[in-house]
């Protein structure tokens, strides 16, 4: 007897390819963002570098969060059943809550440094 909730292999393959293509597009986008951020850093005065560093930190953290979401999507595509989906989702949420707390602390520190003259 087949599982009525089973995802057909063709649909799973399509979803997997879609996630991979989206990840590749995002990585290309982040490459362009990092390149333009580097160009801005080269063109700014030293007093503006601290603000630029804070913005760069925010971009890096956003990239980590999107990468974690892509990783989850890849795992979900390969999940065998609803229990595994729920387990993966739960693990992801716990990890992201911890990451958000750490990222909030890091951004606070970066922002504080950007507001302090002469510190990088």
Image (cartoon, grey):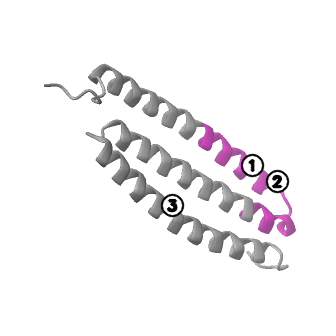
CB contact under 8 Å: marks 3 and 2: no
- As helix, strand or loop, the secondary structure at mark 1 comes to helix
Q: Picture coordinates of residue 96 (x, y %)?
A: 51, 60
93 relative to 109 in the view: left or right: left
Residue at point 58%, 71% (across, down): 101
Locate the C terminus and report the quarter of the image it occupies.
bottom right
Q: Which quadrant of the structure image shows residue 102?
A: bottom right
- As helix, strand or loop, the secondary structure at mark 2 comes to helix
* Residue under pointer 2: 43
Magenta-colored span: 29-53
Please tell me how crowded label 1 is: few (under 14), some (14-19), or many (20+) other residues with Cα within 10 Å.
few
- Relative to 63, is 98 above or below? below
| Most common SS among magenta residues | helix
- Alpha-carbon span between mark 3 and mark 1: 31 Å
Question: Disc 3 or 2, which lies upstream in sequence?
Answer: 2
Q: Is residue 43 magenta?
A: yes
Q: Which of these two is toward me, 42 or 80?
A: 80
CB contact under 8 Å: marks 1 and 2: yes
Please tell me how crowded label 3 is: few (under 14), some (14-19), or many (20+) other residues with Cα within 10 Å.
some
Locate the N terminus and report the quarter of the image it occupies.
top left
Q: Which quadrant of the structure image shows residue 87?
A: bottom left
* Residue under pointer 3: 96
40 relative to 28 in the view: left or right: right
- Relative to 105, is 30 above or below? above
94 relative to 48 in the view: left or right: left
Q: Is residue 33 magenta?
A: yes
* Residue under pointer 1: 39
């Amino acid at each position: 007897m087949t599982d009525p909730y089973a995802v057909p292999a063709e649909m799973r393959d399509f979803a997997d390819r879609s996630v991979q293509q989206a990840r590749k597009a995002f990585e290309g986008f982040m490459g362009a963002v990092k390149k333009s951020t580097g160009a801005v850093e080269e063109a700014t005065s030293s007093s503006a570098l601290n603000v630029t560093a804070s913005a760069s930190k925010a971009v890096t953290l956003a990239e980590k969060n999107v990468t974690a979401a892509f990783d989850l999507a890849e795992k979900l595509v390969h999940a065998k059943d609803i229990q595994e989906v729920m387990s993966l989702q739960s693990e992801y949420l716990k990890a992201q809550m911890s990451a958000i707390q750490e990222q909030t602390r890091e951004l606070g520190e970066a922002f504080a440094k950007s507001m302090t003259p002469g510190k990088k």
